Image (cartoon, rainbow, N blue to C red):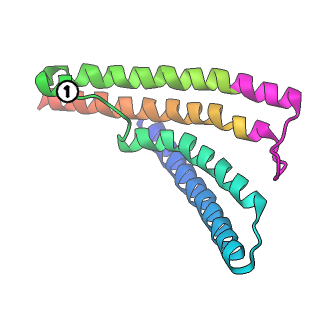
Amino acid sequence: MAKLAVIADKVLTFFEEWTLFITVMVAMISLFFNVILRYGFSYSLAWSEELVREVILYTTFIGCSVAIRTGSTVRVDALVQLAPVLKFPLVIFSHLVNLAFAVVMIYFGVQLAIMQVESRQSTLILDIPTVYLFSILPLMGVLMVIRLLIVMREEILARRAAGRS
């Protein structure tokens, strides 16, 4: 089980980092050329702005999984500072809330993606089928579930190891 968690962590990290890097670089390059064309030649690329909008959506949703990996999710830790004994239960509660959110995103993301398939909608300029954009929601949910399970396992094992010491 530990080996599976390590492999899943490495695969997810590779996927997250490289897809985020590539999408952001493509968006930056297209914006760079759009700025040069706009101010140098008074010509603008309409598709560049739509591409950047889609990249922002992708990076936001895939970034949720990265935030769990790095421990960068939003938390209120005032109660933990007042009562340090409650740290572990509150951390687990926080992870369970995130897990519930991820499951909701999987369920409703699939529903939205199915609606996009049925309606055959696409983006205005790039003509990208919107099912691809809405499929990011369940993908984010799955990545978050896997990340949360890995993080929760690590925290439980660290807690057990600290209890033995």
Is residue 6 left or right of 84 when viewed as pictured? right
The magenta-colored residue range is 110-132
Is residue 15 left or right of 114 when viewed as pictured? left
Is residue 130 shown above or below 16? above
Q: Quadrant of the N terminus?
A: top left
Residue 13, position in %: x, y? 50, 49
Residue hosting label 1: 78
Residue 109, position in %: x, y? 67, 27
Residue 3, position in %: x, y? 44, 40
Q: Is residue 123 magenta?
A: yes
Location of residue 60 (image quadrant): top right
* Residue 149 seen in the figure: yes
At x 75% / y 41%, what residue is drawn? Answer: 132
At x 75% / y 29%, what residue is drawn? Answer: 113
Is residue 92 left or right of 16 when viewed as pictured? left
At x 39% / y 25%, what residue is drawn? Answer: 95
* Circle 1 Cα neighbour tier, 10 Å, few/some/many (<14 / 14–19 / ≥20): few
At x 81% / y 47%, what residue is drawn? Answer: 128
Helix, strand or loop under label 1: helix
Q: Amino acid at mark 1?
A: Ala
